[in-house]
Image: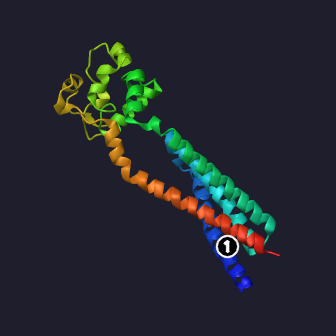
Amino acid sequence: MEGDCLSCMKYLMFVFNFFIFLGGACLLGIGIWVMVDPTGFREIVAANPLLFTGAYILLAMGALLFLLGFLGCCGAIRENKCLLLFFFLFILLIFLAELSAAILAFIFRENLTREFFTKELTKHYQGSNETDVFSATWNSVMITFGCCGVNGPEDFKAAPVYRLLNFNGDEVPEACCRREPQSRDGLLVNREECLLGRDRSLNKQGCYTVILNSFETYVYLAGALAIGVLAIELFAMIFAMCLFRGIQ
């Protein structure tokens, strides 16, 4: 009976890790193709820092899952205690790293409050100065999401750096103006009225509320996914240790 249970656990662990291995191989293949593709796709990725970083993350994740699946498969099917121990320690390290990240995110959650973003915006925002990373990022966010400031256009009345550098006396930056369509390439509905703070051509809603509403579903989904991954890792460690102890 004990032998049958051990055999069942061994094959279940093999199947489980085989899918991890295949997933890692696919991610690794896509990441490598993006980085070395001769058809020009690499240039498109390289032109966008976010995509470029994403390609490297894809490679790292693929390599990690590939190695993890390989260790799990070999350790289970060959009943190799050394590989199973490596697999257990590998999963344990990942589990502890994810747990540490979750604890740090909880500790520093106050850095994601409305008050924090308002303080940073009013203190550092420089308007249309695209050479300043902080201001350029905020301009991109406001144009992309069709919003203005953290709470609304009134944020810029209390922004001393913006007021100092704003020689034309504009009430709001151009990034707050409505566009058709609402994108960086969209045409401004009425630039002059917008810069004077007129409601008809101005995005009045604050970015904090808009972004929170946009990502609310995905935040819960990401949280559920993270809990699921932690649970799977915990069970994988238990299976690996049970198999390790069961092997004579």
Identify which residue, 112 or 28, lies in the foreground.
112
Would you say 49 lies left or right of 141 here?
A: right
Q: Position of residue 160 (x, y in %)?
A: 36, 16
SS at badge 1: helix
Whether residue 188 can be seen here: yes
Would you say 239 lies left or right of 30 here?
A: right
Whether residue 129 can be seen here: no
Q: Position of residue 210 (x, y in %)?
A: 31, 42
Question: Which residue occupies 58% across, 58% down?
Answer: 27
Q: Residues within 10 Å of mark 1 (few under 14, many from 20)?
A: many
Identify which residue, 200 or 225, lies in the foreground.
225
Question: Which residue occupies 43% across, 56% down?
Answer: 221
Residue 95 quadrant: bottom right
Q: Position of residue 114 (x, y in %)?
A: 37, 35
Question: Which residue occupies 70% across, 68% down?
Answer: 240
Q: Quadrant of the C terminus?
A: bottom right
Quick check: 75 above or below 124?
below
Identify which residue, 245 or 147, lies in the foreground.
245
Residue 140 quadrant: top left
Quick check: 44 above or below 202?
below
Question: Which residue occupies 69% across, 81% down?
Answer: 5
Would you say 159 lies left or right of 197 here?
A: right
Q: Quadrant of the N terminus?
A: bottom right
Identify which residue, 134 or 58, lies in the foreground.
134
Would you say 40 lies left or right of 137 here?
A: right
Quick check: 65 above or below 240?
above
Give the labeled residue for mark 1: 14
Q: Position of residue 62 (x, y in %)?
A: 62, 56
User: What residue type is disc 1 on?
Assistant: Phe
